[in-house]
Image (spheres, rainbow, N blue to C red):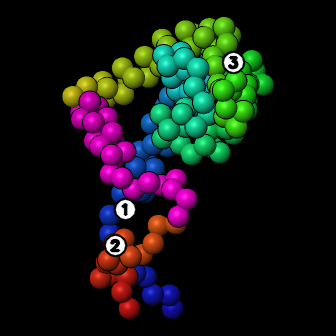
Amino acid sequence: MTTRTPVGPCNNLALRKAARYLGATYDRALAPIGLRSTQFSILQLLSVQGELTISGLAELIAMDRTTMATNLKPLAREGLVTIEPSATDRRARLVALTPAGLAKVKAGLPLWQQAQERFEAKFGAAEAAELRASLDAVLDTGLQPWAEQPWTASLHEPSEAVQA
């Protein structure tokens, strides 16, 4: 017989469930222009920020550099972004929006706006603003999920439910 350890409410699971649910909503809204919500977010951010390094873009979108590079490959293949070595630091690669990428952003904005309005109509505009503020605060917790050293058990005390 397997003994189960009660874990209690899991912040990560709750956040991931909501992220998948809402992400699928935005993916569906953006499907007519052939983009997923993450791709649209990258393009939209580049349209506002201009040229960025892959690392800088990853930091702005709260993603590790390797995952960002993977997400950029199909956008580059489709001619929506360019990825070139930096003239000042050959180790860095710069990402820029192309005219075709800007056209995708312009085509996607009304679709994104509709998804935004639909969510806020169901969830509440004030609640959506509070949610965004709470999620921004999560990014200020200092957990450093992409740090070089692994997170060690010494950083927290195990809960009583997990202790032997």
The extreme front residue here reads 88
Q: Residue at x 30, y 24 (%)?
A: 121
Q: Is residue 69 above or below residue 158?
A: above
Residue bearing the label numbered 3? 80
Residue at the left extreme, as displayed? 126
Measure the alpha-carbon separation of dots 3 and 2. Answer: 44 Å
For the point 72% across and 33% down, the residue is 90
At 36% from the left and 86% from the top, the residue drawn is 163
Q: Which residues are magenta?
A: 127-149
Please provide percent x and percent y for residue 108: 55, 15
User: Is disc 1 surrounded by few (<14), some (14 to 19) or many (20+) residues within 10 Å?
Assistant: few
* Residue 145 in sight here: yes
In the rendering, which numbered label is found on residue 156? Answer: 2
Q: Nearer the viewer, mark 1 or mark 3?
A: 3
Residue 9 rendering spot, x and y as whole percentages: 32, 64
Nearest to N terminus: mark 1 or mark 3: 1
Where 123 falls versus 30 (above or below)? below
Q: Secondary structure at mark 3?
A: loop
- CB under 8 Å between callouts 1 and 2? no
Residue labelled with disc 1 = 10
Q: For the residue labelled by badge 1, is the local secondary structure a helix, a strand or a loop?
A: loop
C-alpha distance separating marks 1 and 3: 38 Å
Verify whether residue 122 appears in magenta. no
Foreground: 142 or 4?
142
- Give whichever of 133, 152 is nearer the camera: 152
Sequence-earlier tag: 3 or 2: 3
Pointer 2: residues within 10 angstroms few (<14), some, or many (20+)? few
At mark 2, the secondary structure is loop
Q: Residues within 10 Å of mark 3 (few under 14, many from 20)?
A: many
Whether residue 134 sits left or right of residue 144 in the image: it is: left
Q: Residue type at mark 1: give it.
A: Cys
